[in-house]
Image: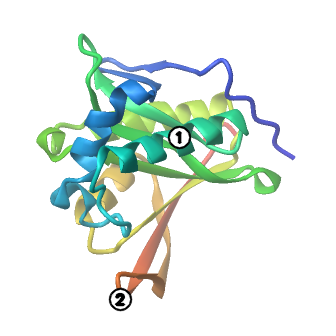
Amino acid sequence: MLQLQFQPFPTLTTSRLILREVTFDDTEAVFDFRSNAEAMRYIGKPKATSLEDSRELIQRFIDGIAANDGITWGITLKGTDALIGTIGFWRIQKEHYRAEIGYMLHPAHWNKGIITEAIKATADHGFRQLGFHSIEAHLTPENIGSSRVLEKSGFTKEAHLRESYFYDGVFSDTAIYSKLNPGA
């Protein structure tokens, strides 16, 4: 079974980004995108309505890291420490060497290749340092932008589950994309 250790926290760097630990200093930035209707459109969870909602989410990030059950990075542009999004692994299936990747970016930074760059760095870390055999992503099929980003990042659509997710009184479909460890 996969053994994970997220401490010390692994900061990841790309040509334009620094993926770093999310702290309570990021509460307002997390609130800024988690309360944004456009950013939350396909998330299937309630928008943040207070800074306390954001603090609770950050605490879940911290708890996941401490338990070695999940890891979330804050996305920042080089030269600034301002958080513009998050990306990470959760629903890690240690016995199957598989994790689900999730990400969110403030709409002011969409269509600039930032999430594609962050996915590449995160997936590479997941395969090379964490030992994942595969990484999956679940999304609402209507989220065409996310589908394109995943395909550009080497993920393949492997399933379409009909009405598999219930939120806010509506059953929604789920598309599942995955990527296998290229070094395996």
The residue carrying pointer 1 sits among few (fewer than 14), some (14 to 19) or many (20 or more) residues within 10 Å by Cα, namely some
Quarter of the image where one finds residue 39 = bottom left
Taking 23 as reference, is 85 above or below it?
Answer: below
On the image, the x and y values in percent for residue 147 come to: 33, 61
Which disc is residue 90 wearing? none
The answer to whether 99 appears left or right of 147 in the picture is right
Q: Which residue is mark 2?
A: 170
* Residue at (68% x, 53% y) in the render: 98
Q: Is residue 117 left or right of residue 2?
A: left
Q: Amino acid at mark 1?
A: Gln
Dot 2 crowding, Cα within 10 Å, few <14, some 14–19, many 20+: few
Task: Check the image and report above or below for 123 versus 79.
Answer: below
What is the secondary structure assignment of the residue under circle 2?
Answer: strand
Foreground residue, 81 or 181?
81
Question: Measured along the vertical axis of the image, is residue 127 above or below residue 36?
Answer: above
Residue in the image at 24% along x and 14% along y: 80
Left or right placement of residue 128 versus residue 46 in this view: right
Mark 1 lies on a secondary structure that is helix
Q: Residue at x 27, y 56 (%)?
A: 49
Residue 54: x %, y % from top left: 37, 45
Q: Amino acid at mark 2?
A: Val
Residue 132, given in percent of the width and then of the height, sits at: 69, 43
Contact check, label 2 and label 1, Cβ < 8 Å: no
Residue at mark 2 to residue at mark 1: CA–CA distance: 29 Å
Going from N to C along the chain, the mark reached first, 2 or 1, is 1
Residue 59, which numbered label? 1
Residue located 63% across and 40% down the image:
63
**In which quadrant of the rendered image does the C terminus lie?**
top right
Q: Nearer the viewer, mark 2 or mark 1?
A: 1
Q: Looking at this rendering, what residue extends furthest in the right direction?
A: 1
- In the rendered image, residue 154, in percent from the top left (x then y), is placed at 44, 49
